[in-house]
């Protein structure tokens, strides 16, 4: 007869086969800042302008409350094939004990190799300390301007690549941001704006072409962009012309009377419309309405017993607020009949005796109080 196994030994025999290695151990959860993913770049004059969102999250998704600095890196002579690495960021779902799949491992490995390749050639360009980020911030964006003229001193700089890294106070760094590239060009210097010429319904701007580029060499200009801002607007937005204009004048017909406008102009090199030189010194103007409306083209006077009915064609102008009626007796001077402008295009004059000859004219008045020229005369003799 066989003896029965003790209960404790039987339990161990049942449990031990279930123990063992399920898979690769999961790596520790990263705690650095989340990588910047919207870095962009434009050349403005002699500067490379980097713009990106303010870093405010950790890789875990928690708020980033201890940002120490943002480090800007630059590669001189970057390959045009250089692209942004995919950051090995925080997991999209809750962490599990399962090992990463092969595709995720390959992505992480490719990101590490891309970062290593970038860091191998990159040099620190700037460190933006958290305490001074207000100088570089505009809303929720951080804007850093990297001077290019030292690199352009030889006439033309090689392609440049940039990336940024966020650093916590404990030294933990974010993965590398997306990489942006720019091929710098020496832009023309600033044009010189002449006196602005206001005209009815438009403002004419003329300027003198720059003679030199930013390195002091003879300038080659491909075109110009014209910018306008109306006070109290503080900054210029998009240019008035969507593509560069070749001439040195521009007519701005999208203006309104009573506003103060400031203008500037930027020159671009040939074939590089996205690279603009420094802005011209601003020229300003208070655009007053000093332009009277035109005359009514037709006036009819209809005589009746002891009165005259006047009818005239309206003046097609948006700012006309009414009309003034004038009457002259015989060969005498015209006398104004209406104290205030008449909003209608007809008027009845009942204040005259019959049997005399009268001459009538009508003038349009605009919102600024400008009085237009007289209409053609209409003659009436009440009976």
Image (cartoon, helix red, strand yellow):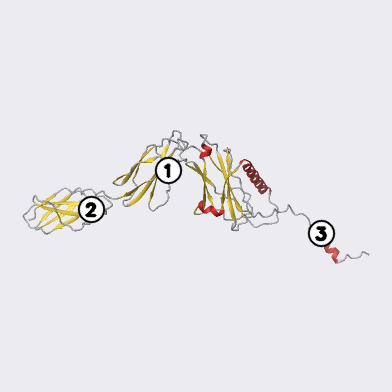
The reply to whether residue 130 is in sight is: yes
- Residue at screen point 27% across, 52% down: 319
Using the image, determine if residue 327 lies above or below residue 223: below
Q: Position of residue 285 (x, y in %)?
A: 33, 48
Residue holding disc 2:
365
Q: Position of residue 22 (x, y in %)?
A: 75, 54
Task: Please tell me whether mark 1 sits on a helix, a strand or a loop.
Answer: loop
Categorize mark 1 by other alpha carbons within 10 Å: few (<14), some (14-19), many (20+): many
For marks 3 and 1 on the same chain, the one whose residue lies earlier in the sequence: 3
Categorize mark 2 by other alpha carbons within 10 Å: few (<14), some (14-19), many (20+): many
Residue holding disc 3:
16
**Residues under numbered marks 3 and 1 in contact, where contact means CB atoms less than 8 Å apart:** no
Compute the Cα span from label 2 to label 1: 40 Å
Residue holding disc 1:
279
Q: Nearer the viewer, mark 2 or mark 3?
A: 2
Categorize mark 3 by other alpha carbons within 10 Å: few (<14), some (14-19), many (20+): few
**Count of marks placed on residues:** 3
The outermost residue toward the left is 355
The outermost residue toward the top is 218
The reply to whether residue 178 is in sight is: no
């Amino acid at each position: 007869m066989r003896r029965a196994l003790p209960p404790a030994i039987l339990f161990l025999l049942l449990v031990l086969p279930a123990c063992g290695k399920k898979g690769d151990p999961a790596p520790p959860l990263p705690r650095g800042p989340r990588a910047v993913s919207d870095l962009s770049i434009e050349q403005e004059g002699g500067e490379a302008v980097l713009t990106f969102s303010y870093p405010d999250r950790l890789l875990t998704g928690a708020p980033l409350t201890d940002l120490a600095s943002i480090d800007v890196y630059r590669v001189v002579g970057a390959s045009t094939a250089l692209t942004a690495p995919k950051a090995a960021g925080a997991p999209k779902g809750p962490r599990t004990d399962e090992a990463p799949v092969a595709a995720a491992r390959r992505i992480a490995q490719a990101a590490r190799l891309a970062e290593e390749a970038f860091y191998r050639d990159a040099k620190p360009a700037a460190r933006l300390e958290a305490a001074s980020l207000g100088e570089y911030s505009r809303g929720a964006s951080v804007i850093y301007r990297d001077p290019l003229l030292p690199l352009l001193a030889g006439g033309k700089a090689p392609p440049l690549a940039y990336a940024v890294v966020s650093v916590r106070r404990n030294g933990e760094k974010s993965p590398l941001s997306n990489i942006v590239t720019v091929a710098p060009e020496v832009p023309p210097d600033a044009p010189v704006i002449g006196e602005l010429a206001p005209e009815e319904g438009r403002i004419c701007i003329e300027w003198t072409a720059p003679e030199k580029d930013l390195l002091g060499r003879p300038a080659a200009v491909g075109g110009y962009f014209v910018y306008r801002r109306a006070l109290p607007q503080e900054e210029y937005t998009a240019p008035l012309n969507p593509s560069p204009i070749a001439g040195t004048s521009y007519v701005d017909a999208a203006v309104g009377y009573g506003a103060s406008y400031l203008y500037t102009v930027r020159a671009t090199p040939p074939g590089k419309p996205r690279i603009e030189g420094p802005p011209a010194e601003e020229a300003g103007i208070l655009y007053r309405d000093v332009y009277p409306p035109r005359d009514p083209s037709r006036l009819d006077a209809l005589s009746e017993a002891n009165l005259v009915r006047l009818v005239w064609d309206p003046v097609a102008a948006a700012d006309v607020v009414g009309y003034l009626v004038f009457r002259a007796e015989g060969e005498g001077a015209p006398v104004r009949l209406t104290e205030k402008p008449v909003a209608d295009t007809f008027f009845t004059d009942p204040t005259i005796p019959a049997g005399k000859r009268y001459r009538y004219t009508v003038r349009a008045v605009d919102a600024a109080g400008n009085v237009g020229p007289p209409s053609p005369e209409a003659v009436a003799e009440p009976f």
